[in-house]
Structure formats: structure tokens, C-alpha cells
Amino acid sequence: MAEEKANVEVEETTATTEVKEEVTTQQDPKEFLESFDWDKYEEGIEKVDDSKLDEFEKLVEENFVDTADEEVVEGKVVHMTDREAIIDINAKSEGVISLNEFRYNPDLKVGDKVEVLIDIREDKTGQLVLSHRKARTIMAWDRVNAAHDKEEIVTGFVKCRTKGGMIVDVFGIEAFLPGSQIDVKPIRDYDQYVGKTMEFKVVKINHEFKNVVVSHKALIEADIEEQKKEIIGQLEKGQVLEGIVKNVTSYGVFIDLGGVDGLIHITDLSWSRINHPNEVVELDQKMNVVILDFDDNKSRIQLGLKQLEKHPWDALGDEIKIGDKVKGKVVVIADYGAFIEVAEGVEGLIHVSEMSWSTHLRSAQDFVKVGDEVEAVVLTLDREDRKMSLGIKQLTPDPWTDITSKYPVGSRHKGIVRNFTNFGVFVEMEEGIDGLIYISDLSWTKKIKHPSEFVAVNDTLEVEVLELDVEGRKLSLGHKQTTENPWDKYSKEFAEGTLHKASIAEVVDKGATVNFNEDIVGFVPSRHMEKEDGKKLVKGEEVDFKIIEFNKDFKRVVASHTAIFREQEERNVRTAKKRSSSSDEAAPTLGDANSQLQALKDKMEADSKK
């Protein structure tokens, strides 16, 4: 009661009793004392000692709270039931709060002090309405704002995962922790943080939407920045440091050196060839690396891993020498050859020309593929430049060693057409032995402009060895020599002066061509295309032709149609001249002369008709 809390001893007078009654019935004793009209009771009433009144006012001010609505005050748990807690805030009456608001504190007991919010000073039943949850929220926002303004470190409980990050309980407020703000390195498993209590820094507050963003990374970065300055200041080329694999890409590996990132290029991971860095390292792996280089600001650091080991060429034994046979795996194939790993980090090149004895070069893919285990012969070995050339064809005998006995001049064989050039055809006699047929040695009669008009790649041709150059490794072949030269028999059939019937095949600028048969094509000069009536022969017209030139060596045949009737005319003129001279001796008459001219005319007309 009010008089117990005030503990003021007042004399038993009617006036003081009324004052006590007034004090006990008012909700706020302080307010009552300020507004009470003491003059009303002065007359006939014993005056109260001023010191007593001052003491009374002081006690009221210290013990009674100003129970304004929406105010956070501190209360004391005075009693607990199964469902509620009774809280004393030194007001007219105690307040009741559901235990649900204290679920975060299962150890709550009588005597504990808690923060509460005065919702209503007195409801319809006269009960003081309090809220601990609202008080915590208000106090939490005050603490969050203060932590943000002062850049203080706060402690929070990671409740669960959410899209893009985590939900963290900070002072009872659900704050958002973005995934990028959890750690300085990428996080692959968010669940490992659920249920943990961690330290955070409040980085952003949105008062309008009541959103709070926190960061754990900011705390780490502050520590890392100090470590980074210390590490950068001590960096030297050749220095070996311990780091953790932070990220793996197709071109290299990023290493965390304790706040400073460095890159190991894929070529500096292993002395052996690798297709991807994950063949050598894995994420979060600890390893030693050596500093190869860095820029002036030391912001880009080039690291190496393979440099920590001895170069494989230095460890290559002296037992390998030129001429030895070695085995290895094909690791890289290029158009010009294949690289063979004969030992870890030691490679040799087999040039495509060393893969087969054939002079007809092909691509390296025609012989080997990546991953093949092959045997080869060491051709060259340079330990200083760390280069080695190998050969596969040396494992088999050189087919040119006994070429003279297998392919003597004049012998006939069969080969496969492998390639064309403008001047001839390359024919493979066997693996490693190719020969050339010049275009002029393909056919006795056909005029070939390109070998593809006569044969196709992979065709089988019968050939005759024309020339053999062992030192130059050259073999000259002929195809037409395997058949009889038709120009030998045509030299009689188409001798000069013989007549043949044929038609004009093509008309060209200086004449025309005539196909006498499938082998013989003759040429008719323009002046030899004139007919007896003075007109020119045209394409497709069939007439008699006279061979006026036949050259077997140059395969040249020239024919003429005009020569046939011109020759007859010349004979008739010569005959007439002879008769004319004989008639002069006999002194012929005019009638005899007319008779002879008429006979000559009739004969010429008859010949013309023929």
C-alpha cells in the first residue's frame, strides 16, 4: 500500500487521516502531493513538520515509477505460475506476463530482473498490462542502432538458411547475413553455420522496413588487412610460403597466403602435362608454394608449385642415349607430330616424317592418338635445352635398302594412287616407297590436262619402273608403258596421203578437230576446210579427209578436205596441157578444139558429182 511504501508517520488527526486516505486512493502519489490544497486543512489542524513532508516526497520519488504508456522500465519477478510471471515495477499493482515471452530464457526464476514495456497503466479490471517481448524489441533496436553508429561488434545466433544467405538473431531481432558476407572465401556449404553463435558487425539498417544487415566477413577483413600488409612487406622472389587453395579455374589455381591471393598458372603446377588443375590440387588444400614474380604494387603475385621439385630432366638417368628404344604415352598431338612422355615431365617429339618410311606425308592423327602407349627410338637428345626427338619408323627396316632388287628398271608392278599434282600422280608401291608418274606417261593417246581426268585417289594402277635414284630416294614410273603403243600401228593406217571419212568435232579459231577413232584426233587448218563450192565445213559435217601430216613422236595428225578436189583439178589441168601441146603439132581445126573443151568440161562435171 501507499502508506507502507511511503513509511511516513503522521499524527492521528482527522486532517492527516484524510491525507493518508487521499494518498492511498490515488494512482500517482507524487501527482497527488503536487496538486493537494494544503490550505484547506490548515485551520484547526496540527501542522505537519516540513522535514517530514520533504522525506515523504523523496521516498515517493524514489520508489514510485512514472507509469506512462509505451515506456520501458525494469521490473522484478515476484511470483511465477505454470503459465505466467508476476512482475513488480513499483507501481500501484503488479503486472502479469505470459511465460511464452520468456521462451528464450528457460532459466527464468523469482527475483530476476527483466525489462518490460507498459502497454496500459490500468485496463478495465484495474490490471497493469506489461509486455516483455515489446520491451526486448525496443531495447534491441536501441542496441543495434548504437552498435551500428559506434561500429561495435555484436554477437548473434545463426537460426537458419534463407535465399542468398542466413538469418541471424541479434538482440532478438532477425538480421540478414548475405552469403558473400560470411567469409572472405567462397562458401559452398551454408548449413555448417546453422546453430552457431558468431560475432558480427552491423553494416546496414533500414528503419523504414525494419531490416538489419550484418557481416562476419567485415571482421575477418580487418584482421586480414593487417596480415596482408605484413605479408606484402616481406615478399621476396624465391620465398616459400604456405597457402590454402581458394579457387580452382581452368587456367590456374588461386592460393590464399593469409590475406594475400596469388595465382599458380596451370603450367606451373606440374612438370607433366595436365588438362585441368583439379588433377593436381583440390579446394581448401594446404600446400607450400614458391613466389616466382610479382608486380610493383605486389598486388598480383605469381606462384609456382612444380618449382619446389627437381626438374625431371635433371633427374633423367644417363642410361638413355641416342639410338635407345624407349616407351611412353602420347600426351599431345599436333599436325606436325606427337609428343611422347617417356618419363614424368620428360617429353620427346615424334615428327610426322619419322612415323613412316613413306614420303607421302600424312597427319600425325593417322598414326597415333592421345593416350596410346608407343615405342620409339631416340634420334636426338639435348639435355641442356631439354629436347628429345624420337622416331617410330626406325623400328622397321628401311624399305629402300634393297630397292634395286625389288624394283629394277623395266620391272612391272601394281601400286595405289595416293595423291595428285598438276604434273603427275604419286603411286605407293609399298609402305615407304612412293613413285611418280608424270602426266605424259599416263596415256599414249589421250591429251590429259590434269591427272584427275584419268585416275582417282586409291585406284590401283599397273606401272613400269622407268628410272631409279637410290641416293635421292626417287622412283620414276610409267603407266602407258605397260600397254602397246598404238601409234606404231597407226603410222601405217594414217600415213600421209591416206583418205579417211570423218565428221567435224569442234571448230576453233585456226581450224577444226576431227575424231578419226577413240585414239586419233586430227587437226584441220582453216584453209583446208574449204569445200569445192567455196563454202567452209561446219561442226558435225561428215566428209573425206586426206592426211597431209603424221608425226608419231609428237602425236600430231593434220588432215585436209580441200586437198582432195584441188589435187584433182591440178591433174585435169596437167592433162589438158598435154593434149594442147599434141594438138599444136597436128594443127587441129577449130571444131576439134571445141570438141576437146566440151569433153574436158563434161569430165570435170562428172568428177565434181562424184
Image (cartoon, rainbow, N blue to C red):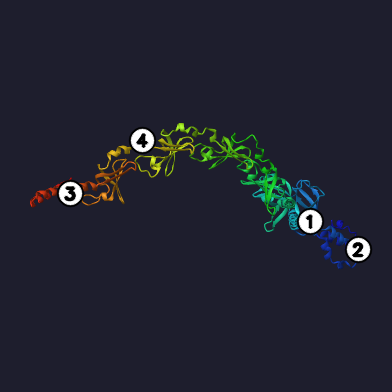
Q: Do the residues labelled 1 and 4 touch (CB within 8 Å)?
A: no
**Tag 1's secondary structure?**
strand
Cα–Cα span, label 4 and label 2? 152 Å
Tag 2: amino acid: Ser
Q: Looking at numbered disc 1 in the image, what kind of residue is underneath it?
A: Val
Expressed as whole percent of the image width and height from the top left, the position of residue 116 reads 77, 54
Could you say which quadrant of the image residue 444 lies in? Answer: top left
Pointer 2 local density, CA inside 10 Å: few below 14, some 14–19, many at least 20: few
Q: Which of marks 1 and 4 is in front?
A: 4
User: Residue drawn 42% across and 44% down?
Assistant: 423
Side (left or right) of 481 relative to 43: left
Amino acid under disc 4:
Thr
- Residue 599 percent location from the top left of the image: 12, 48
State the CA–CA distance, disc 3 to disc 1. Answer: 155 Å
| Mark closest to the chain's N terminus, 2 or 1 | 2
Point out residue 55 in the picture as x, y percentages from the top left corner.
89, 61
The residue identified by callout 4 is: 483
Within 10 Å of the Cα at label 3, are there few (<14), some (14-19), or many (20+) other Cα atoms?
Answer: few
